[in-house]
Image (cartoon, rainbow, N blue to C red):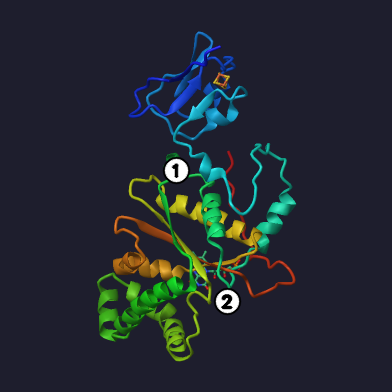
């Protein structure tokens, strides 16, 4: 029998969903899960009838006949070089929550790394794991910049340190701080009282003994950013970031978010430019990575949090 694989003609800019009409049994499951009403049943067969699609792949994942294919989905992104991943979908309630919580609580910010490079295949796998995260309207407008060597990390560290040296020099100007505060721009004064001294000490230590208090001697960095146009760029990037942090722990790596580097990259475009990130991209997270040189005996807890309820 000749296979009829038609690219459905739609109002979309490109035709990006293929439905094999010979395989389709008309069960309608793809219609039910589609968030945008893109697919409908026509004479017992699924057809692409809507003009928009998130290209989320729900239709492809739900189809018992393997009759749907979303062209935009790149299978390569689900193939990992350093481990093999199950392709079967894990139903709700089928993963032990105790194991999940143990992993989440065992991830600590690592500030002591071995002088050992992280394999590039691991860094690439981490990014693939990162992008399993959800994103607003499935825009996936995140970007990842990899600094795969200690030398590259040191080069970024120099730029960040130089930014903070300039910031500290400005913050030392008392009259300027007070004037800015008077006109409602209290950020410099807040920085002076909250961070100035700590940063000064770290910079002096770095210049004196070379101790890296910024990246803690990590041997790789992944910078997570966003391209313009995403509906929720920061949320998308940070969800991918948390995936990377958890996966890093699972893969034997330590990680630490470096907020100081994010601040420098946000406020001084030349820092971002130095590592090849275009000006139109926004940086949301800088993740220091490496083989950890620390062992904990137990999981640490958190402060008390009281949820607020709203009920009617
Ligand atoms: C947005 C953000 C920025 C951070 N920036 C830094 C940083 O610049 N340097 C650092 O050593 N740790 C940084 N951290 C790590 C926090 O200090 C750490 O997450 C917190 O103390 C809790 O410890 P844990 O991560 O081990 O659970 C940052 C964490 C977050 C979430
Ligand atoms: S889920 Fe698959 S078999 Fe069911 S209607 Fe959609 S394309 Fe056809």
The quarter of the rendered structure image containing the N terminus is top right
Q: In the depicted view, which residue is nearer to us: 262 or 7?
A: 7
Q: In the depicted view, which residue is nearer to us: 22 or 204?
A: 22
The x, y position of residue 97, in whole percent, is 72, 49
Above or below, 270 relative to 125? below
Q: Report if the beta carbon of the residue with label 2 is closer than 8 angstroms to ligand 1.
A: no
Dot 2: what SS? loop
Which disc number belongs to residue 22? none
Q: Residues within 10 Å of mark 2 (few under 14, many from 20)?
A: some
Q: Residue at 49% of width from left, 21% of height from top? A: 19
On the picture, is 291 further left or further right than 168? right
Q: Residue furthest front?
A: 1
Which disc number belongs to residue 115? 2
Q: In the depicted view, which residue is nearer to us: 101 or 305?
A: 101
Q: Residue at 28% of width from left, 85% of height from top? A: 173
Which disc number belongs to residue 136? 1
The x, y position of residue 254, in whole percent, is 60, 67
């Amino acid at each position: 029998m000749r296979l009829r694989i038609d690219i459905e003609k739609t109002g979309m800019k490109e035709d990006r969903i293929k439905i094999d009409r010979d395989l389709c049994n008309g069960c309608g499951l793809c219609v039910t899960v589609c968030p945008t009403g893109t697919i409908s049943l026509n004479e017992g067969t699924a057809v692409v009838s809507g003009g928009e699609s998130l290209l989320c792949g729900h239709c492809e994942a739900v189809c018992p006949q393997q009759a749907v294919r979303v062209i935009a989905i790149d299978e390569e992104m689900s193939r990992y070089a350093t481990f093999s991943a199950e392709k079967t979908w894990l139903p709700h309630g089928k993963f032990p929550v105790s194991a999940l919580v143990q992993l989440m609580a065992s991830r600590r910010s690592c500030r002591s790394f071995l002088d050992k490079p992280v394999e590039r295949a691991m860094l690439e796998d981490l990014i693939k794991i990162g992008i399993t995260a959800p994103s607003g309207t499935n825009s996936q407008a995140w970007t990842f910049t990899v600094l795969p060597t200690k030398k590259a990390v040191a080069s970024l560290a120099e730029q960040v340190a130089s930014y903070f040296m300039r910031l500290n020099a400005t913050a030392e100007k008392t009259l300027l701080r007070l004037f800015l505060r008077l006109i409602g721009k209290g950020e410099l004064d807040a920085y002076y009282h909250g961070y100035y001294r700590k940063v000064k000490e770290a910079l002096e230590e770095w210049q004196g003994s070379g101790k890296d208090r910024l990246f803690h001697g990590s041997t790789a960095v992944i910078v997570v950013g966003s391209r313009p146009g995403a509906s929720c760029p920061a949320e998308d990037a940070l969800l991918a970031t948390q995936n990377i942090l958890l996966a890093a722990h699972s893969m034997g790596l330590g990680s630490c978010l470096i907020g100081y580097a994010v601040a420098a990259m946000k406020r001084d475009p030349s820092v971002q430019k130095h590592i090849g990130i275009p000006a139109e991209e926004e940086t949301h997270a800088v993740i220091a990575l490496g083989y950890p040189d620390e062992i904990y005996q137990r999981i640490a807890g958190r402060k008390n949090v009281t949820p607020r309820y709203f009920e009617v």
